[in-house]
Image (spheres, rainbow, N blue to C red):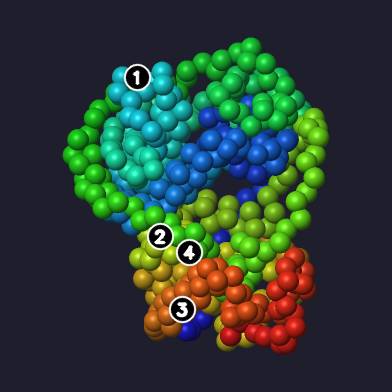
């Protein structure tokens, strides 16, 4: 492995970093139901109902599993930011593509009445990238996997008017946060349909709130069925999606710290007593982004498609690999006083190099971009450092991924964590599993 500074990219990101001085961005999904977005901020931690959580988890797992199969359709999960609004487009090709999973398919002429949020979300993505048309891919999915596909091309009359509506919803949401009350926000589409804030008595909704006018739906001018796209996607999904093994790797840190991963799944935890419902807070969240958030804002504020999810070549780990301009991206914050010299990265922070090597191995790329933000820097000029990591061979990382994955799976099966590598010293001090794991008794260890 070799490490090289990237002065041009560093200068570019620092300039973007300096411009990111506004409030925390609002997500496109927040704009679909701004009353619910209000309560997500003022009453955090309310659990989602089990049935809806199961559907969400199924959708996430399908999205992750489809990465390699749909990568030929375009860039995966392209991040885009515009005027304080952030979106994650499932696939960015000649048009934005929104992928939905559902238990059933709906005729195109019934979408506006039965699934208006699907059309609204697609319209917002089109507006963010300045396109008049987008594509809606709906995958009928159940316990057997994806059983059918619907592909629709949707055209919108004016992306500018859609963007104006988005700005208005953003303004109303921020005003509600600032004033600490949701008065005047439109009726939540989840009211009476399993809304977690309603079930937890954390909202003041009555169901009598005014309905938001169908401004976004009024912009839909045509919905056209695309049988050619449907057949192409059906062909890509012909082989059933593999079932997830409960002992499989979930994250890259499971490879770096397999003993910690074992105890996070099986370690004893104290159950907190159930708390009585409390009224939502009346403060004005959300707070401005922290350093880590500002780094991601700088990275994502370029052209649409710079930051995407890279298609993996391996089924594990399940964690997505985020890429910047086609190479794996690793963004970290540090409390170190000094920036890294290229020749000392492995000595000071070997975990960065190891995790980047694993990400490169999974995606089949021989280099990656490391962006580090320094919390103790006195000014923005010194707060961001960019290094490029180049690997002459990915074989050692592929082998490590395979071997530690097998070792963790065996330890989970036999409930014997003693065979797993101990965590490095710096992780053991505040580890919640310290007494059960016995890592602290192993002695001095390093990640190298």
Residue at image location 58% in from the left, 81% down from the top: 419
Front one among 1 and 20 = 1
Q: Earlier in the sequence, mark 2 or mark 3?
A: 2
Within 10 angstroms of label 4, few (less than 14), some, or many (20 or more) residues? some
The CA span between labels 2 and 3 is 23 Å
Within 10 angstroms of label 3, few (less than 14), some, or many (20 or more) residues? few
Residue 390 is situated, as x and y percent measured from the top left of the image, at 44, 79
Q: Which mark is residue 248?
A: 4
Q: Earlier in the sequence, mark 4 or mark 1?
A: 1
Q: Earlier in the sequence, mark 1 or mark 2?
A: 1
Placement of 329 over or under 32, stated as above or below: below
Q: Which mark is residue 315?
A: none
Q: Earlier in the sequence, mark 2 or mark 4?
A: 4
Residue 180 is situated, as x and y percent measured from the top left of the image, at 77, 29
Residue at image location 46% in from the left, 47% down from the top: 60
Q: How many marks?
A: 4
Circles 4 and 1 in contact, beta carbons < 8 Å: no
Residue at image location 25% in from the left, 45% down from the top: 233
Front one among 230 and 132 = 230
The CA span between labels 2 and 4 is 20 Å
Can residue 95 be seen? no
Q: Nearer the viewer, mark 2 or mark 3?
A: 3
Pointer 2 residue:
310
Pointer 1 residue:
110
Would residue 96 be found to the left or right of residue 444 on screen? left
Placement of 284 over or under 312, stated as above or below: above
Q: Which mark is residue 403?
A: 3
Q: Earlier in the sequence, mark 3 or mark 4?
A: 4
Within 10 angstroms of label 2, few (less than 14), some, or many (20 or more) residues? many
Residue 344 is situated, as x and y percent measured from the top left of the image, at 61, 85
């Amino acid at each position: 492995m070799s490490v090289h500074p990237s002065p041009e990219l560093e200068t570019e990101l620092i300039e973007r970093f300096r411009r990111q001085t506004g409030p925390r961005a609002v997500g496109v999904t927040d704009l679909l139901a701004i009353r619910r977005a209000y309560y997500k901020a003022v009453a955090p931690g309310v659990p989602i109902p089990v049935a809806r959580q199961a559907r969400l988890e199924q959708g996430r797992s399908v999205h992750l599993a489809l990465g390699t199969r749909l990568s030929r359709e375009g860039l995966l999960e392209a991040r885009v930011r515009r005027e304080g609004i952030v979106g994650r487009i499932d696939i960015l090709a000649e048009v934005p593509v929104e992928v939905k999973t559902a238990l059933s398919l709906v005729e195109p002429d019934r979408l506006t009445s039965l699934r208006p949020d699907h059309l609204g979300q697609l319209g917002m993505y089109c507006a963010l990238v300045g396109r008049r048309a987008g594509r809606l891919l709906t995958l009928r999915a159940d316990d057997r996997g994806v059983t059918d596909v619907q592909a629709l091309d949707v055209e919108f009359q004016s992306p500018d008017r859609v963007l104006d509506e988005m700005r208005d919803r953003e303004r109303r949401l921020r005003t509600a946060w600032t004033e600490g009350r949701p008065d005047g926000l439109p009726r939540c589409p989840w009211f009476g349909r399993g809304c977690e804030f309603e079930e937890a008595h954390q909202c003041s909704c009555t169901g009598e709130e005014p309905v938001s006018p169908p401004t976004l739906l009024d912009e839909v001018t045509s919905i056209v069925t695309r049988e050619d796209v449907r057949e192409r996607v059906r062909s890509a999904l012909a082989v059933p999606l593999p079932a997830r093994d409960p002992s499989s790797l979930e994250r890259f840190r499971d490879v770096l710290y397999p003993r910690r991963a074992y105890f996070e799944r099986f370690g004893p935890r104290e159950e907190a007593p159930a708390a009585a419902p409390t009224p939502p807070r009346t403060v004005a969240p959300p707070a401005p982004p922290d350093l880590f958030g500002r780094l991601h804002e700088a990275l994502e504020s370029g052209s649409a498609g710079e930051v995407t999810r890279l298609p993996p070549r391996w089924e594990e780990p399940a964690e997505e690999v985020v890429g910047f301009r086609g190479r794996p991206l690793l963004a970290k914050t540090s409390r170190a006083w000094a920036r890294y010299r290229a020749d000392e990265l492995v000595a000071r922070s070997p975990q960065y190099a190891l995790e980047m090597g694993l990400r490169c191995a999974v995606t089949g790329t021989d280099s990656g971009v490391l962006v580090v933000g320094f919390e103790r820097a006195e000014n923005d000029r010194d707060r961001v450092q960019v290094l490029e990591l180049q690997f002459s061979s990915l074989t050692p990382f592929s082998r490590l991924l395979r071997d530690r994955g097998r070792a963790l799976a065996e330890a989970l099966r036999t409930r014997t964590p003693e065979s797993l590598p101990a965590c490095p010293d710096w992780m053991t001090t505040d580890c919640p599993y310290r007494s059960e794991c016995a890592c602290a008794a192993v002695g001095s260890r390093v990640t190298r």
